[in-house]
Amino acid sequence: PRWSGPSVGWIVAADKKQEAQDLIIQLNQLSPQELFKRRTTTAPSSSKEKNEKSRNSSPHTKDKKGRLFILGVGGSAGNASHAVNDFRKIAGIESYTPVDNVSELTAWTNDMGFEFIFVNWLKTSHLNKKDTIMVFSVGGGTEKTSKNLLLAMRYAKKIGASIVSIVSRNGGAALRFSDVCVLIPVISQENITPHAEGWQPVLWHLIVNAIQ
């Protein structure tokens, strides 16, 4: 069966619509089985055409020699570490995640508090407008939950860096701050986390394959 619930795809800020069209993934048109056959003729023609456009154009971060910083908490942190490998090795983009350095992560937690771990790491990394942060999260960050993601995105927006996110629930802060946000539909209240964190690797692998 196809996914029920809200239409899914790239949700974009008004000034980024054309840019996002080159990277669009229309999940609402695909069943889970079809998605895994994304690179075959089983994908709908409209999705194939858009996917082909993304293959023929590199993301602006790569073109500008910018860096990609991937942020996530809990299971999404594990996904962030995996994704760094793929974006570096396959896509050729200089990529990092703060969760790979336990010493620094725990030092910031101890000295400043858990909610400041990402924003301080980005400041130390001299985040700039050529860079992009990618956020993996179930809820997208709020003032009460995963505030570390909210503060990081707020800082990135202030600096002028691009923000890409793969989230679920109502999108949280990621939906508000992101230039491009993939919103995973809630099809089961009991399985929001496994669905959200399970689709993160499917989506980043599709992105990596499109720009390699």
Image: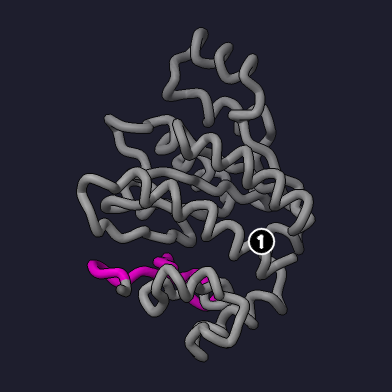
Q: What residue sits 31% from the left and 38% below the top?
A: 142
Residue 45 seen: yes
Query: Could you tell whether 208 is left or right of 32 in the image?
Result: right
Q: Can you identify the residue that label 1 sits on?
A: 208
Amino acid type of the residue tagged 1 in the rendering: Val
Bounds of the magenta segment: 3-20
Q: Nearer the viewer, residue 187 or 8?
A: 187
In this orientation, which residue lies closer to the viewer: 20 or 86? Answer: 86
Q: Nearer the viewer, residue 197 or 178?
A: 197
* Residue 75 % position (x, y): 46, 36
Closer to us: 86 or 166: 86
Which x, y percent locates residue 22?
A: 58, 76
| Residue 24 percent coordinates (x, y) | 51, 73
Q: Secondary structure at mark 1?
A: helix
- Decide: is 41 above or below 106: below
Image vertical order of residue 201 relative to residue 41, above or below: above
